[in-house]
Image: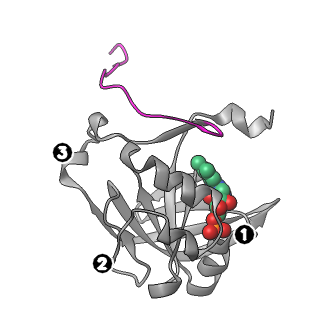
Amino acid sequence: MASYRLLYPMRTYLVVAGKSEKANVMAADWVTILSADPLMVGVAIAPQRYTWKLVKKYKEFVISVPSLDMLDDVWIAGTKHGPEKLKEMNVTLVPSKAIETPSIKEALANIECKVVDERNYGDHTWFVGEVVGSSYQEHAFPNGKPNLEAGFLAHAAWTDFVTFEKKIYRPKE
Ligand SMILES: Cc1cc2nc3c(=O)[nH]c(=O)nc-3n(C[C@H](O)[C@H](O)[C@H](O)COP(=O)(O)O)c2cc1C
């Protein structure tokens, strides 16, 4: 077993890159927040990915938050190469607010990023994006908290995905 699996389960996201007819979508687990103010996020993308070339070229990307309903699309995004896959997917690319890379209409949220740094680590490139815009579905984030029944997607093992239970656990005060 690859030792990175010891860090699983992880959340699964979609990365959108490119513009207009060249836009592409891939699945990505290796996404994190780096700074709250200004809000910055990082994503590890391997150079073999079509998405890598687009992020390098346009210096922008969108992190989209898929729901469990989008699992089949996530799988296509995560196993097929290049924008042709979009013809097989049931996602609608819509204009973003602050960048030219589109957002995904069906996603629970879209985080629009401009690349401010990048660095190669081993077999992936770590792209750092400053968040310049965002959008989300109201039902998924009522009162500023995620609605656990919205179907946030997490990845347990290669073909195995999970979502969250509604039960909340709180630490002793
Ligand atoms: C659930 C899942 C998570 C993935 N996470 C990443 C990731 O974090 N970084 C990465 O480079 N590839 C990741 N991949 C692989 C890419 O999504 C996959 O190679 C995809 O086909 C690349 O598409 P592209 O060549 O069109 O950019 C993941 C795949 C799956 C199924």
Crowd class of label 3 (few under 14; some 14 to 19; many from 20; radius 10 Å): few
User: Residue at 25% of width from left, 47% of height from top?
Assistant: 140
Pick the quarter of the image with the N terminus.
top right
**Image coords of residue 162 (percent x, y):** 48, 33
Residue matched to label 1: 119
Q: Main secondary structure of the magenta part?
A: loop
**Image coords of residue 57 (percent x, y):** 62, 86
Per the model, the C-alpha gap separating discs 2 and 1 is 27 Å
- Which residue type does callout 1 highlight? Arg
Q: Which residues are magenta?
A: 157-173
1, above or below 58, in the image = above
| Disc number for residue 145 | none
Mark in front: 2 vs 1: 2
Asked where in the image residue 43 lies, by quadrant, the reply is: bottom right
Residue matched to label 2: 97
Q: Is residue 120 visible?
A: yes
- Which residue type does callout 3 highlight? Pro
Asked where in the image residue 107 lies, by quadrant, the reply is: bottom left
| Disc number for residue 142 | 3
| Residue 172 part of the magenta segment | yes
Tell me the quadrant of ligand 1.
bottom right
169, above or below 8, in the image = above
